[in-house]
Amino acid sequence: MSETTENKEQLEEVNEQANEAETNGTETNEQVELSVEEQLNVKITELEAKLQEEESRYLRLRADFDNIRRRTQLDREAAEKYRAQKLLTELLPVIDNLDRALQVEVNSDDAVSLYKGIEMVYKTLIEATKQEGLELIPAEGEVFDPNIHQAVMQEADSEKETGIVLRELQKGYKLKDRVLRPSMVSVNE
């Protein structure tokens, strides 16, 4: 029996060692699995951060693109709205000269015919410029506005309030809402 007991004890000892080895191996495998799992989690976290960064970059680029498109559209609309500005600015001296010609008194029949011809040309030119959006800036009797009037002199008129335009020395014009040339005026002190 002693031999059997001894064999049993040896067998139990071997089983215990095998169990311990198996437990140690499982722990080692778990540690290896945890480190692989941790590595994968770190990789996932890195990829998620990179994805968020790329999404943010994409959204910024999209916003920039939308801003550029909107700015281009506004520029295009402004160019269309004020397309005649250069031409109308160059025509202002012509309008002034025709206006001065119409202020001359005529006595002879030939001069009256010439006057009527100039008047027709003037009216046609004014009508064409109005169709493009040219407007005369009101001045005489208006309150002085430095945005649309240019004061070149001051006069004293006790019958009118201060800051009122007394005389218009040169007509001013604007194209839609943009001043092409301010009115040159004399303002009451």
Image (cartoon, grey):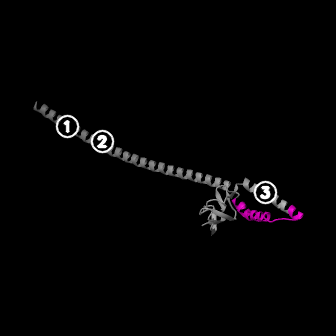
Q: Nearer the viewer, residue 107 or 76?
A: 107
Please report the residue visible at 25 percent of the width from the left and 39 percent of the height from the top: 22
| Farthest top residue in view | 1
Crowd rating for badge 2 (residues with CA inside 10 Å; few <14, some 14–19, many 20+): few
Q: Position of residue 160 (x, y in %)?
A: 62, 62
Report which residue position mark 3 lands on: 123
Mark closer to the chain start, 3 or 1: 1
Q: Position of residue 27 (x, y in %)?
A: 27, 42
| Residue stretch rendered in magenta on the structure | 85-113
Report which residue position mark 2 lands on: 30
Q: Position of residue 23 (x, y in %)?
A: 24, 39
Q: Nearer the viewer, residue 90 or 163?
A: 163
Q: Is residue 115 above or below residue 31?
A: below
Please report the residue visible at 15 percent of the width from the left and 35 percent of the height from the top: 9
**Residue depth check, mark 2 versus mark 3: number of the one nearer the observer:** 3
| Amino acid carrying mark 1 in the image | Glu
Marks 2,3: beta carbons within 8 A = no
Quadrant containing the C terminus is bottom right
Crowd rating for badge 1 (residues with CA inside 10 Å; few <14, some 14–19, many 20+): few
